[in-house]
């Protein structure tokens, strides 16, 4: 994902507009911040050292931007890949016809009662633990009331003041192309809810969601995009969802405000929606930082209003959707049709013990093995690739060589054939065998590559192929 | 306070006569009367509530009297001026009842999240197809396969 993000940025046409300036600038924003291991960018901290020049001679964009900092928070909705909906036993599949999988509960018919899907709590606890959160042993559901065409009940079942998890953090490493560096961002809360809407686009109204709210710790587009990418990684590692932004199973709404560096008071907060990829998260934020900073520098801060803006992929800018007339009155009250959610210590422990090795732990382990950050980020990105790598070195293969083969020829093959690492016929055992054979001098590297291709496409063993093709190197 | 407002808006719904002008009416026909038998007797509950508040002294409420026109607007219920005049004291009584609850001294009592004591009522993640989808669809007044047509819902809140 990190590589995809990078590719997205590089492909962005270098038009003479603000966003192009900002791509450079966000790099500078980033470099200005300290990169100590345990950095936590908190709300009030003056984490960005002020640049030297106090007086601007010309209102060049760079000069404008270096006097401002952006405060960014993200709300993410993760669709859970359960077999049934949140509060009824209707099956749900992505892409099914509208109104096919329905029953009185999800249609919101009078008298129908919701019953919580036990898998939803399991997913919530898994994700809460993976995000280092504290869990509310007792939590509850609330009704969030508003009117919308595909909300037949007139309310959405959510969690308001007592979410299942709160007060955690997420660790990630920024891609090498963007300067690298370790980051820790706070997680305010994780809660369970049903998806309001979506009936129009598929038969999937009321699928279970987890909403993750971050602390406003991000400072630029790269950090925000990586945060989203790490959440996707986590969601996939845990197997709670497929976290696909394009499909809508991972949705990010960004909240951003800009203020002059040194000012304690926050700027006006703007929400950005309609972000369908990590790179659009990055570009939308960069655009918005420029928009707000320019207005502020021209003394037009009243032009920045608290509103929701949409990211337009075509024109590469944010546009007004509608102005928020104060906060919505959702008239939350506890959902009377659902009992409270009670987590026992045994339950939580059993889930904790079954958690897989999380991306952050894996990255640190790979670091200790001596791999470069570039290698680490690639290998740890996809849990299946990491497993393949781990299995290969478990068979005794050299760490660096295994990494090189996986990142090089194997990755290229997977991309060309559009296969995942689980689909190729090569096994970790045979990769280890191949590496050993080359290292031991039995075959040359060139022959190794040929054998590899056959192994990936057709399977088989290294020894078998060497014999079959009589490939043993003479006297080396 | 939010709880009181929510209760007040539900009370308003009932006073108005349980035929909400919002789109929920679309789905409410004879064909699905089977489900309506499981609707809890809300009317009875409200009567009891009103009786209760009448039988105790009406101490001045510590809660703000609700702005009825605004409440009706948020609940998407239209009220005539007579109805506003008639309902305001009744809704006021419901809210005052909560005011009485709020006056109770509870410093030493641990706040409860919910009133029930039943354990988890969960179900397994096992799909079951509802076997009378046709009845659901046939009771929709305006169905253009595969979509249900609903009246225009003007959304004043930002969502």
Image: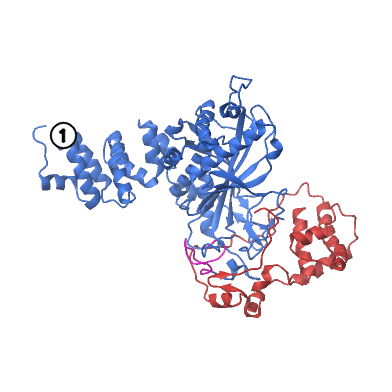
Provide the chain ID for the residue under circle 1. Answer: A
**A176 and B155: which is toward the camera:** B155
The percent position of residue A1, horizontal first and vertical second, equals 43, 43
User: Which of the image's four quarters has the C terminus of chain A?
Assistant: top left
The percent position of residue A405, horizontal first and vertical second, equals 28, 39
Chain letter for the red colouring in the rendering: B
Q: Is residue A269 visible?
A: yes
* Left/right of residue B99 with respect to residue A199 in the rendered view: right
Residue at 43 percent across and 40 percent down: it is A11
The percent position of residue A155, horizontal first and vertical second, equals 66, 60
Residue at 50 percent across and 71 percent down: it is B129
Vertically, is B72 above or below A223? below
**A153 and B93: which is toward the camera:** A153
Mark 1: few/some/many CA within 10 Å (<14, 14-19, 20+): some
Query: Where is mark 1, residue-wise?
Result: A441
* Chain A colour in the picture: blue
The percent position of residue A304, horizontal first and vertical second, equals 67, 40
Residue at 62 percent across and 50 percent down: it is A163
Magenta-highlighted residues: A85-101
Q: Name the quadrant containing residue A104.
A: bottom right
Question: Outermost residue, bottom direction?
Answer: B30
């Amino acid at each position: 994902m990190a590589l995809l993000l990078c590719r997205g940025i590089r492909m962005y046409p270098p038009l003479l507009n603000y966003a192009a300036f900002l791509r450079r600038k966000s790099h500078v924003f980033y470099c200005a911040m300290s990169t100590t291991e345990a950095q936590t960018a908190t709300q009030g901290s003056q984490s960005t050292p002020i640049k030297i020049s106090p007086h601007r001679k010309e209102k060049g964009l760079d000069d404008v931007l270096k006097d401002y900092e952006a405060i960014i928070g993200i709300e993410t909705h993760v669709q859970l890949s359960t077999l049934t909906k949140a509060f009824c036993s209707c099956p749900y599949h992505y892409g099914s016809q509208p109104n096919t999988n329905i029953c009185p509960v999800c249609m919101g018919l009078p008298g129908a009662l919701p019953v919580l899907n036990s898998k939803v709590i399991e997913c919530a606890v898994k994700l809460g633990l993976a995000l280092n959160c504290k869990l509310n042993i007792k939590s509850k559901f609330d009704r969030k009331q508003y009117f919308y065409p595909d909300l037949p009940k007139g309310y959405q079942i959510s969690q308001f003041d007592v979410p299942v998890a709160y007060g955690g953090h997420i660790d990630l490493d920024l891609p090498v192309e963007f300067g690298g560096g370790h980051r820790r961002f706070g997680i305010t809360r994780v809660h369970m809810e049903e998806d309001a809407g979506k009936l129009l686009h598929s038969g999937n109204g009321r699928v279970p969601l987890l909403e993750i709210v971050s602390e406003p710790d991000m400072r630029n587009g790269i950090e925000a995009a990586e945060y989203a990418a790490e959440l996707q990684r986590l969601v996939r590692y845990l197997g709670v969802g497929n976290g696909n932004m394009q499909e809508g199973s991972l949705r990010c709404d960004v909240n951003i405000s800009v203020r002059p560096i040194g000012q304690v008071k926050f700027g006006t907060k703007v929400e950005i929606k309609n972000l369908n990829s990590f790179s659009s998260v990055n570009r939308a934020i960069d655009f918005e930082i420029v928009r707000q900073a320019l207005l502020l520098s021209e003394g037009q801060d009243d032009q920045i209003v608290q509103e929701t803006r949409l990211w337009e992929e075509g024109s590469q800018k944010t546009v007004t959707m509608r102005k928020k007339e104060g906060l919505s009155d959702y008239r939350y009250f506890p959902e009377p049709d659902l009992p409270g959610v009670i987590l026992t210590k045994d339950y939580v422990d059993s889930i904790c013990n079954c958690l897989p090795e999380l991306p952050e732990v894996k990255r640190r382990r790979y670091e200790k093995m001596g791999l470069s950050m570039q290698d680490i980020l690639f290998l740890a990105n996809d849990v299946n690739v990491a497993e393949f790598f781990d299995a290969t070195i478990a068979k005794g293969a050299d760490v660096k060589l295994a990494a090189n083969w996986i990142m090089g020829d194997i990755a290229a093959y997977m991309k060309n054939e559009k296969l995942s690492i689980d689909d190729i016929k090569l096994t970790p055992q045979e990769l280890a065998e191949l590496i050993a054979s080359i290292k031991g001098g039995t075959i040359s590297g060139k022959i190794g590559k040929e054998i590899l291709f056959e192994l990936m496409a057709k399977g088989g063993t290294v020894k078998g192929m060497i014999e079959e093709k009589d490939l043993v190197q003479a006297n080396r | 306070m939010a709880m009181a407002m929510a209760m007040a808006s539900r009370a308003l719904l009932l006073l108005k006569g349980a035929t909400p002008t919002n789109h929920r009416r679309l789905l409410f026909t004879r064909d699905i009367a089977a489900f309506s038998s499981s609707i809890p007797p809300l009317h009875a509950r409200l009567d009891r509530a009103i009786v209760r508040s009448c039988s105790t002294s009406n101490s001045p409420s510590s809660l703000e009297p609700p702005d009825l026109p605004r409440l009706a607007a948020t609940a998407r219920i239209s009220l005539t001026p007579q109805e506003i005049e008639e309902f305001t004291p009744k809704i006021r009584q419901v809210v005052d009842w909560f005011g009485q609850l709020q006056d109770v001294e509870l410093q030493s009592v641990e706040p409860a999240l919910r009133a029930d004591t039943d354990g988890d009522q969960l179900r397994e993640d096992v799909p079951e197809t509802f076997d009378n989808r046709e009845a659901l669809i046939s009771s929709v007044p305006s169905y253009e396969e595969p979509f249900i047509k609903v009246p225009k819902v003007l959304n004043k809140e930002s969502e």
